[in-house]
Image: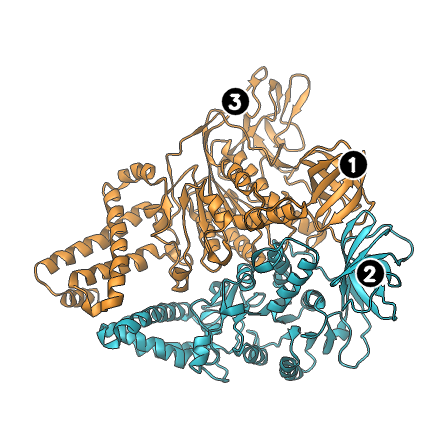
Chain colours: A orange, B cyan
Amino acid sequence: MSGKVTSISGATVCVDFPDLKIGDRVLVGTNRLTGEVVRLDGSVATVQVFEENRGLGIGEPVTTAKGPLTVHLGPGLLGGIFDGLQRPLPLLQESSGDFITGGQNPFPLDCTRSWDFSSAHKAGDKLLAGETFGKVREGHIQHHLLSAHAGILEQLNTGELQLEHPAAILEGNQPLHGWHSWPVRNARPYRRKLPPTTPLITGQRCLDFLFPLLKGGVAIVPGGFGTGKTVLEQTIAKFADVDVVVYVGCGERGNEMAGLLDEFAELEDPRSKRPLMERTIIVANTSNMPVAARESSIFTAVTMAEYYRDMGLDVLFLADSLSRWAEALREISAALEEMPGEDGYPTYLGSRLSGFIERAGAVETLSGTQGSLSMILAVSPPGGDFSEPVTQACLRVAGALYMLDSQLAHRRHFPAINWNQSFSLYSDTAMAHFSELHEEWAKLQARCRDLLQREEALREVAEVVGMEGLQDGDRLLMRTAEKIRLDFLCQNSFTEDAYATPQSTVEHIAKLVAEHDRLAAALDDGALLDDLLKEAADASL
Amino acid sequence: MRLSEHQYRSVSAIRGPLLFLERVFASRLGELVRIESPDGRSLSGEVLKISGGKVLIQVFGGTHGLDTRHTTVSFSDAVMRAPLGDGVLGRVFDGSFRPLDDLPMFIPEFRMPVIGAPINPVARAHPVEFIETGFSTIDGLNTLVKGQKLPIFTCAGLPAREMTDQLLRQARLPDGGPFVLVFVALGLTHFEYQFYRQTLEHMQSRFVAFINLADDPVVERLLAPRLALTVAEDLAFRREMDVLVIITDMTNYCDALREISTAREELPGRRGYPGHMYSDLASLYERAGRIHGRKGSITLLPTVTMPEDDITHPIPDLTGYITEGQIVLSRELHQKGIYPPVDVLPSLSRLMQHGIGKGQTRKDHRDVANRLYRAYAKGCDLRRLEAVVGRDGMLADDRRLLDFADRFETEFVHQGKKRRTIDATLDTAKTLLDSFREVAL
């Protein structure tokens, strides 16, 4: 069965092809470019093409790939680098050179690699769809092979397993492979959602101490250009205490992706001491790669993330940046001549976005274990204006806001997280855990916020009367607050300081607060601040 | 595949730079067409959109003199390709690749599509090699590396032109090797072009120029940078040269994009610029870079004139989201007589971290740069306070920081037309920091 191209407007192509379904994957033209059906009108289907389609001609053939846009899930995804359609970029480089050309569809998993397959099941066992039927060792994790469909096990081929051969046979001579495919637009199922309870340690003092995230939680990171979104996302990708990291470079810079790939190849995971790439999946769709594939890239990535969550693992999904995804959605919507909403974005931006973000969460998996999928999503508001639709739509569903401030960035205060306007709804739950680590955690956090708040107020006074005009006690407070800002909240991602354990974080702030209290007590006893500071400076020499 | 060239005289409408054609048999998206006007003029165009037999064509060069009855359009069955070869060096072309230097067209060795394919992210080599520009504010605080794209954000009336010219004359690679320059002028005035001609002459024949002046066809402004980058990719990745691409001025490019978009009746976005401007700009800027296993590189230095000196205007804003940093010029510094008037606080080079330090510049580079930034940022903050309470009402340390900020501008930022080596830059910085040691910078 096939059809013909009847009209072309950019990446939106109309084809005369009866009996297609919305969401079907089709191959367009003689170059067989991948596309997805987005609209049907009689026998004419509108197709969004995911690859560069200049040169595509009217009348060229279109065939169906029978089924929706899917990803392939199985052992060997970790360490992989894919584009927005899950095509492995290293294989694309081998087959078509240093530049990406269209129409290539290599299989994303290595079918010839051998895995040591073991199973606790035996012939005759009943399997539910999505249930674990065996395990292989993938890097530092136990990779659960999940059953694509329900049935009764007839035979298990344990031992050496290659993905091209079936891992098991179900009753009715139905082969069960170690991999299966899943439509990217459908969230993978679980038994039920659980309330997130465990903190996700990012290693960033400012985040862990003031605005903690939970495993299964969602944080958004809006910031104008140059405020350090990418560096923050990449630093968290290196150090976060999770089992698997899925990093999506969505419409961002190619050189930054190259830097990330170089760095991750060399670094090791601080916990397992194995190469960092072994726990990472990278999806790269740089800003000059086709727009429609940018739209699909976050779905491709989140489906892989859910797959690892379903093994009972803690997965962190990082996207840089969600605004580029929204812009891709806007371009597609404009090409379809849909009625625009705010700033030209389609009116379904909010619902599409919340549908996506709700794929995060802590869950009880179909196998009965507990897994989590957390998200940290960068947003790039135009002109640094946070009132724009994407930031606002994200705010309605995110549990934490890490707002990046260009004033702080200009002063080279990194991470440039604005401590007044950021928030975390997970603070109270996280506190229960952190209080076990240090009983004063809650108190110290309140003190820290209070000092920073009072500095803000005093600064306004100082702008009127000058620092000379301030009382010693106020000057001390300004000094302590400055120390908190520069020593504690600032953290250089390019030095050893890039990662701080919660223990060192809380000790650090406890020390600063204790020194403040000691000097404040001395002031109360009649000492002069200048003398005290001179003493302290002499002591440190 | 069609066997012969198709010709049509079925133009149904002409609107601005767009031509609407009917009853076309089988056209391709992006197909190159040749248009013969009734008075015998020949123009080229590109297919933008096809709906059945109706074809929308973007015409390069003015549509003046075209009509709906006698204008002939021939379809080439191929996308637009740029002629390439060694003969391109030392030549000056217009926005449609026609020679402007009174010499005959060179003989192309081969042709490549002007819409380049994206570099596979795994094939990209991370840019790390330091380029010495001779400007302290760039080398010391916003270091440029080979394969980076770093725009200059300027305001009307500031000496971005002089800076670009000086940068071209004095930029050096770490091994001392020279650059090949690909120069793209978009909507430049004749007056400005006269100035750049001297720069080109200085480069002898190590340059290729694409010149679209202010009174040249607007649509060619969209084409010229793509031709130039196709040439640059050939020089960098086939001939293995280090290529510096200068595009001035991207603001004119974006205005041209807006003009075409409006003619196509696309939905206008912020300030009337089309919603796809980010992707469009990325398709130019992202062509900079290096590739594993190939010696050459493309370093891209576009100039962006910020309308109303506003950095949040869509053009600098979207540019900043794609490029690896920005060099921002300041009217205030310019009025103080400081040259180059680079405001280092909003300026940034994202790739600096890997291009400096031992083996690249100097061991102390990072530390010196951090201290300069901190102290200058503090000094600038205090200037607001000074405006309210006066210098006398301030603490001694704060007064010293104000002195530092002043001297930083006059001694470090300001360097006149003199070239500074990286050593001289760092030494100037250290002398400055040392004389303020007592305020614990």
| Residue behind mark 1 | A17
Where does residue A171 sit, x and y in percent of width and height?
A: 65, 17
Where does residue A336 sit, x and y in percent of width and height?
A: 67, 45
C-alpha gap between disc 2 and disc 1: 29 Å
Q: Are marks 3 and 1 in contact (CB under 8 Å)?
A: no
**Residue located farthest toward the right when viewing the structure as drawn:** B4
Instruction: Tell me which chain the residue with mark 1 is part of.
Output: A
Instruction: Tell me which chain the residue with mark 2 is part of.
Output: B
The secondary element bearing badge 3 is classed as loop
| Residue behind mark 3 | A120
Near mark 3 (Cα within 10 A), the count class, few <14, some 14-19 or many ≥20, is few
Residue found 68% across the figure and 53% down from its top: A100
Observer-nearest of B385 and B64: B64
Q: Is residue B32 left or right of residue B435?
A: right
C-alpha gap between disc 3 and disc 2: 67 Å
Observer-nearest of A531 and B7: B7
Q: Quadrant of the C terminus of chain B?
A: bottom left
| Residue behind mark 2 | B33
For residue A187, above or below residue A534: above
Where does residue A46 sit, x and y in percent of width and height?
A: 72, 41
Q: Is residue B408 left or right of residue A366?
A: left
Q: Could you tell me the amino acid type at mark 3?
A: Ala
Q: Could you tell me the amino acid type at mark 1?
A: Phe
Q: Could you tell me the amino acid type at mark 2?
A: Val
